[in-house]
Amino acid sequence: MKKSKDYENHNLMITTYLGTHVLPSNLGRAFRRCLDTVEVDKIRFHDLRHTHASMLFTLRVHQKVVQERLGHSSITVTLDTYSHMLSNMQEAVAESLESAFKKESEKEPKITNERSVQTAVVTTL
């Protein structure tokens, strides 16, 4: 969007054509018009924030990074709000660990007798 000659940069993400704050009611109205235009389900503008956080957790982005992106005052706020996402990720973490252990065990030499065990231990040391 072109800036007006009267535009003042207040370092805001979403602004009016003058660079000032957008009233939440106006933002909501404009967002609903956009949703109508593209014919998608009705959601609140704030739901985009939750979707963003959920996507970050699904991508296994570190919780501290998610906290910073959302602007929460502490990691506790983030974890309290999105703890349900973390519990859903437990299975994925377990599967990743299982896969990693399988790959490591495939690399290890097969031990067939006591002499092989001694050789493996000495080689490892």
Image (cartoon, grey):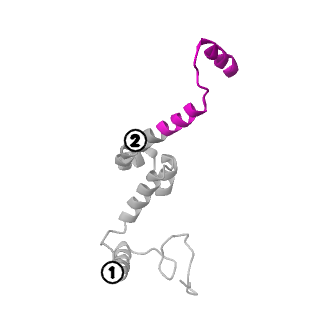
How many numbered discs, if any? 2
* Mark 1 or mark 2, earlier in chain: 1
The residue positioned 50% from the left and 39% from the top of the image is: 99
- Is residue 115 covered in magenta? yes
Which residues, given as a range, are shown in magenta?
A: 97-125
Amino acid under disc 2: Gln
Which class describes the residues within 10 Å of circle 1: few (<14), some (14-19), or many (20+)?
A: few
Instruction: Give the left or right position of residue 108, taking residue 13 as reference.
Output: right
Q: Which residue is mark 1?
A: 36
* Residue 118 visible, this orientation: yes
Question: Helix or strand or loop: what does disc 2 sit on?
Answer: helix
Amino acid under disc 1: Asp
**Could you say which quadrant of the image residue 46 lies in?**
bottom left
For the C terminus, give its image quadrant. top right
Whole-percent x, y for residue 89 in the image: 40, 45
Whole-percent x, y for residue 28 in the image: 35, 74
Question: Helix or strand or loop: what does disc 1 sit on?
Answer: helix
